[in-house]
Amino acid sequence: MNRAIRHTWVAGVAIFTVLLLALTYVQFFAARTLEAHPWNNRSLYDQFGADRGAILVDGDAKASSTPSDDDFEYQRVYTDPLLYGHLTGYFSLVYGATGLEAALGDELSGASDEQFYDRVVSMFSGNQPTGASVELTIDPELQRTAAELLEGRKGSIVALDPETGAILAMVSSPGYDPNELASHDSGSVIAAAERLNADPAEPLVNRAISGDLYAPASTFKIIDTVAALESGEYTTESSIPNPQELPLPGTDVTLPNYVGGGCTARTEADLEFALEQSCNTPFASIALDLGEDAIRRTAQNFGYGESLSVPLKVTPSIFPEELNESQLALSSIGQYDVRTTPLQVAMMSAAIANDGLMMKPQLVETVRSADLSVIDEFTPEQLRRSTSAEVANTVTDLMVEVVEDGIARGAAVPGVEVAGKTGTAEIGSEEGLNDSWFTGFAPADDPQIALAVVFEDVDVATGSSLTTTSAKQLFEAVLNK
């Protein structure tokens, strides 16, 4: 009898131990995997029924959770969706999360490590956990102005604080309404996604930081200018050949000068005139003289090739490798296979504006828990020294001349020195359309804003007018506060 009791007791202890170990494994080791399992409907309902934190701009919620009368307790709602949709992204029952909803998903849902004690308190109090709120660095007036300037056209505008890296505006056009993809009606969500994905204008793409990227065109001449000055072989007094056509080595093709400026006035050019009139052949000559490595190294110093999170993931800009001389000449004017994001171009101008120091761009100002305590807070972070203060100041002076006496006069603000550079990227359109750029900063002697503006599919005259006058309005929106 004693032996039977002992066997029963040992078996009971063994079963209890196995159950305890299994419970421990499920609770502490397999929890994440089980939560993510596609068949875990309870996890799905918990996620989409949760009270996620708000995404705020100047204290106003642009994404928030409101009570729902369906199977889920809350519905994610987006305010000013066309203005902020590419930043907030969407939180979808069918397609998951994008944008900040994905990048800060743990914080917004209350699942981050920093919110552990909040979850413990909620568990013991019986209250449902509430996610953290996220305040953005965006200036709402500047964001709205940028969106209005782009309305009805494809393109992007990015504006930064050069001293801190704070993103003041980030707009991609056309936009989309994330409410359509966050609905709890799966049928309507799928229909909306199919329509948006079929749209040739690609409204779901955040052109500011991703997509197929743009040829930077003559905005890249800022990098050529830095490379020339850093080499010690060129100064602002150097005389550079300025033929109206430059034969591309190894080809039967010539590189023409920019026809929209005054390049024909001189057969020799200094850096000021070449940048002011955006002459192609002097910069191609500089690149051929300095070589591929020097131009690539300078481009990398300004962020080309770097992976970046703001915390939205940024597609790295590209400067191609293993170039022959004709390809290098084309690359030096921002064509061939050079590709970039508007954020990268704005960062380039911001680094020049900030005495050669490139700050890390950041979209998030603060993350606060439900009791308003700060979980994370934006602090300026230096990415690198892109160039010396001396070179940056020289380039600033040259960019000021581009606006005062060159082809970017449309960006001039009365009573303020503005530094800038235009660009026209040939895209092979049969209609002769281009992507048109402006990048720059103001005031030149105390920069408050650096920006990049790009309009797609425009003719040369229209593009130049759109980009420079848009930049002027954006500068005024900040400087007139």
Image: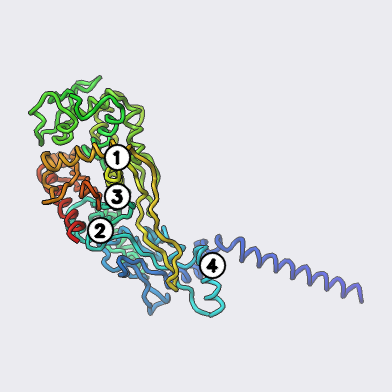
Badge 1 element: loop
Residue 200 seen in this snapshot: no
Badge 1 is on which residue? 339
Badge 4 is on which residue? 116
Instruction: Give the mark nearer the N terminus: 1 vs 4.
Output: 4
Horizontal and vertical percent position of residue 286? 24, 26
Badge 2 element: loop
Marks 2/4: CA–CA distance: 36 Å
Q: Do the residues labelled 2 and 4 touch (CB within 8 Å)?
A: no
Label 3 neighbourhood size at 10 Å, few (<14), some (14-19), many (20+)?
Answer: many
Q: Which residue lies furthest to the left in this view?
A: 265
Marks 2/1: CA–CA distance: 22 Å
Badge 3 is on which residue? 162
Residue 216 seen in this snapshot: yes
Marks 3/4: CA–CA distance: 36 Å
Q: What residue type is labelled 3?
A: Pro
Q: Quadrant of residue 83?
A: bottom left
Instruction: Give the mark nearer the N terminus: 3 vs 4.
Output: 4
x 78%, y 67%: residue: 14
From this view, report whether residue 130 is shown above or below residue 246.
below
Horizontal and vertical percent position of residue 474? 19, 55
Q: Which amino acid does label 2 sit on?
A: Gly
Q: What residue type is labelled 4?
A: Phe
Which image quarter is the C terminus in? Answer: bottom left
Give the label, 2 or 3, closer to the camera: 3
Which image quarter is the N terminus in? Answer: bottom right
Marks 1/3: CA–CA distance: 22 Å
x 42%, y 73%: residue: 51
On residue 289, which mark appears?
none
Q: What residue type is labelled 1?
A: Arg
Say which of 240 and 459 sits in front: 240
On residue 175, which mark appears?
2
